[in-house]
Image (cartoon, rainbow, N blue to C red):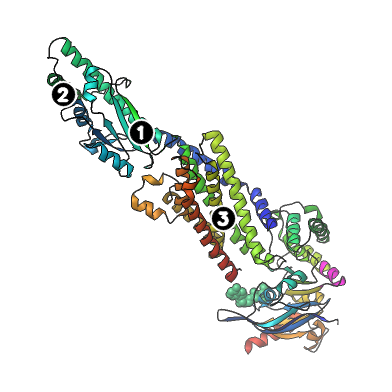
Amino acid sequence: MAEDFLVATDLHKSFHDFKAVNGVSFSIAKGEIFGLLGPNGAGKTTTIRMLSTVLEADSGEIIIGGHSVRKKAESVRALIGVCPQELALYEDLSAMENLIFFGRMDGLNTRDARAQAEEYLKLMGLQDRAKGRVAKFSGGMKRRINLAIALMGNPQLVFMDEPTVGIDPQSRNRIYETIEGLQSKGMTILYTTHYMEEADRLCDRIAIMDGGKIIAMDTPRALKAQLGDSEKATLEDVFLNLTGRSLRD
Amino acid sequence: MWLIALKDLRIFVKDRAALFFFIIFPFMFILLFYFLNLGAATDERLTYYLVTSEAEGGLSHQIINLMETKNESQLKPGEPVFVVESNFDEAYQKVKDGQLSGFIAFPADFTERMTTGSGAQLEVVVDAGAGYDRAALNGIAAAIASQVGAEQIVIKASVSLLVEGGIIPPDEESINQATRQILAEITAEQSQTGGEPSFIGFDIERVGDIESGNPADYVIPGYLVMFVFFAAAVTAEAIVRERQNNTLERLLASSVNKSTILGGVYTGTAVRGLIQILIFWVAGILFFKVDLGQSPLAVIILSILMVIMSSAFAVMLATLVRTQRSAGSLARVTALILAPLGGCWWPLFILPEWLQTVAKISPHAWANTGFNKLMLFGADLGAVVPEMLALVVFTVIFGAIAIWRFRTSAV
Ligand SMILES: Nc1ncnc2c1ncn2[C@@H]1O[C@H](COP(=O)(O)OP(=O)(O)O)[C@@H](O)[C@H]1O
Ligand SMILES: [Mg+2]
């Protein structure tokens, strides 16, 4: 693969005495879709928050696009887009207003922001609802807006934290297609989920996280191969196998 | 920064309920209290001193004796308390020192003028600094004059009838005695003859200056202070919502830095406050005939400082609490405690001294004192510099806490 766009080394983050992230290291190559897979509370979101400059790590180092998150947060922010696990939208504004606002916050001028907003709304199949108030949207539509906002401002790396949680199959499918389209344009993506089939379908490589640690990291195929019969095994099996074992430790 | 402010304003404008609360609601309150105050203006129990420069035995002594409040508990609502004081200079000094709100003085030649029929002039000395507004004072002074005047007409008429009829000799002692008798009868009957104060006039000498008796002149600023603060404080909720609905985190990961975000949120709140005071003053002047006093500029500056201070408070509150709900309730509780304490619902100067001192912990008290000085007592800009400085100090304190909290705890 190409050179690494993101390198995270030995990240630690505790909340009070609780180690949410406990020595996580991985790297993502440019243009790669990297999956962070794990049950709830594994530390995926905490990891993403550290990577996206919002949360300071207790220790460890993060380099994104050649910039250290600790020292050059501003430069990193210009490179990334974040689709948070929880919806981060202004419910009282229209879809269009949300997109333009966040685009402007990413440094776009009004014209570019509007052009991109139109483009991404179309990509998400929401062009007809551009002027509708977000509060009136369905869960799936909000999810798609949430993702579209992450794409504003030409990011090279997008963090997607469970972007498909709790939505209808149509919305979910649209999101899959979007992600695949983005990858073909050279975008690097970090994708977290606890849906195995999702990771299987989308990701080039997967890290399985549990209890704040990465307990396995490889391509979906290789992970399944660990179970022996790679044809019949699903990632679910791999996952249960690994996390189950770690519970017994 | 402006973009964030603009976005907040856009959200705000779309919120009909907030808009209602922001503009219509305050005016419903103002209207209500405006009329309550119109009615209540003369209903305050004032203590009036009665002073006479006449020698003992003069007519004024009789009147004073009559008017003196013997038993305060028997007073009807709105009736002033009258206390007799013998020394004019002492009373005058007391007014000057602010110990006394006012007194009525009878001239040394009162009896002579009354008996010769040339008409006597009462002197009403009131302390503008004590803050009773002129409408109330006028009303009371007029009531006194009319009461005294009416009684005097009766007495004068009766006495002269008695003299003319030769029933009593026309010497001073006899007249005085007759007057005393008639006065006693009047008191006994508790007669309240109405009528114009045709015989005794009164002059009001104001120690200080009271320009206006329009209740709106203190009702409007009071509510301006209350609602500007209230509306701003409640936006703390919206700021916390920004944090809770994760948009703040999203902003933090975008290309704007923290101080811009804080500045934007602050600006949005402040702009809203500025629009609010604009509406308040325009409506106040158009519909309530508010008089901004000698220095409208000072009133405007004070209003703007109030907005700046309130916005800083809102941002500080937002950085101190965790949940939207606690932000909302804390904002409301603070606003509702500080409003009456700070003199938004009644003039501060009618509160006991110790409460006035306590009130100084609220920015409201300073703002209201400033507005009262400007709009009731005719002060100019220079006189309200302390109040303005106090608001600046509050702003700095609130702002510093907000910035410190935002730096250390952001999300
Ligand atoms: N701000 C926080 N304060 C305290 N504990 C937290 C905080 N954020 C996350 N945690 C805890 O850290 C653990 C990992 O959380 P998270 O990273 O959200 O997991 P995931 O995204 O994999 O579900 C959880 O047990 C969670 O309760
Ligand atoms: Mg999570």
Q: Quadrant of residue A236?
A: bottom right
B199 displayed left or right of A1: left
Point out the tag, 2 or 3, that comes first from the N-terminus. Answer: 2
Q: Position of residue B409 (x, y in %)?
A: 58, 70
Q: Which residue is mark 3?
A: B311
Q: Nearer the viewer, mark 2 or mark 1?
A: 1
Q: Which residue is mark 2?
A: B180
Real-space Cα separation, disc 2 to disc 3, in angstroms: 66 Å
Number of other residues with Cα within 10 Å of mark 1, as a class: few under 14, some 14 to 19, many 20 or more: some
Identified by mark 1, the residue type is Glu
Q: Quadrant of ligand 1?
A: bottom right
Up the image or down, B401 lies above or below B235; here it is below
Q: Position of residue B70 (x, y in %)?
A: 20, 36
Identified by mark 3, the residue type is Ser
Q: Are marks 3 and 1 in contact (CB under 8 Å)?
A: no
Q: Nearer the viewer, mark 3 or mark 1?
A: 1
**Range shown magenta:** A178-187
Q: Which residue is mark 1?
A: B205
Between A194 and B50, the one nearer to me in the picture: B50
Q: Position of residue A213 (x, y in %)?
A: 67, 84
- How many numbered markers are drawn? 3
